[in-house]
Amino acid sequence: MAGKRKNYSAEFKAKVAFEAIRGEATVAELVAKHGVHQTAINAWKRQALAGMAGKFSGKAGAHAAEKERQIEKLHTKIGQRVVERDFLAKASGR
């Protein structure tokens, strides 16, 4: 029977990754402290470092701006549909 895979919260992963990045404890010490496999700790550390690089590269800002443009576009489309609905309702005599 295979063992169950443990799911960790994003907060826990960030905490452990930050401890690994700081380097005040070895990965082996973090394994003993948190009961997490060293492969997971190293992966979380890599993900954290990659995420930080993205924050500094401006990609996060560009992504947020694109989301805002999409939301504005959807709001415009919703407004058009409301006007069309109201016009058709009046035209049909409702």
Image (cartoon, rainbow, N blue to C red):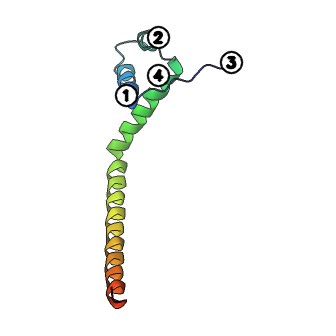
Residue for badge 4: 41
Q: Quadrant of residue 93?
A: bottom left
Ranked by sequence position, the earlier of labels 4 and 2 is 2
Whether the residues at callouts 3 and 1 have beta carbons within 8 Å, the answer is no
The vertical placement of 56 against 80, above or below, is above
Indicate left or right for 37 with 81 as reference.
Answer: right
Ranked by sequence position, the earlier of labels 1 and 4 is 1
Q: Residue at point 31% right, 60% down? A: 68
* Residue type, label 3: Met
Residue for badge 2: 28
Mark 4 Cα-neighbour bin, 10 Å: few <14, some 14–19, many ≥20: many
Ranked by sequence position, the earlier of labels 3 and 4 is 3
Residue for badge 3: 1
Residue for badge 1: 14
Q: Nearer the viewer, residue 78 or 87?
A: 87
Q: Residue at point 68% right, 18% down? A: 1
Mark 3 Cα-neighbour bin, 10 Å: few <14, some 14–19, many ≥20: few
Ranked by sequence position, the earlier of labels 1 and 2 is 1
Element marked by disc 1: helix
* Residue type, label 1: Ala
Element marked by disc 2: helix
Q: Nearer the viewer, residue 53 or 12?
A: 12
Gap between marks 1 and 2, in whole Å? Answer: 17 Å
In the rendered image, residue 23, in percent from the top left (x then y), is placed at 36, 17
The vertical placement of 79 against 69, above or below, is below
Indicate left or right for 66 with 46 as reference.
Answer: left
Gap between marks 3 and 2, in whole Å? Answer: 28 Å
In the rendered image, residue 20, in percent from the top left (x then y), is placed at 39, 20
Element marked by disc 4: helix
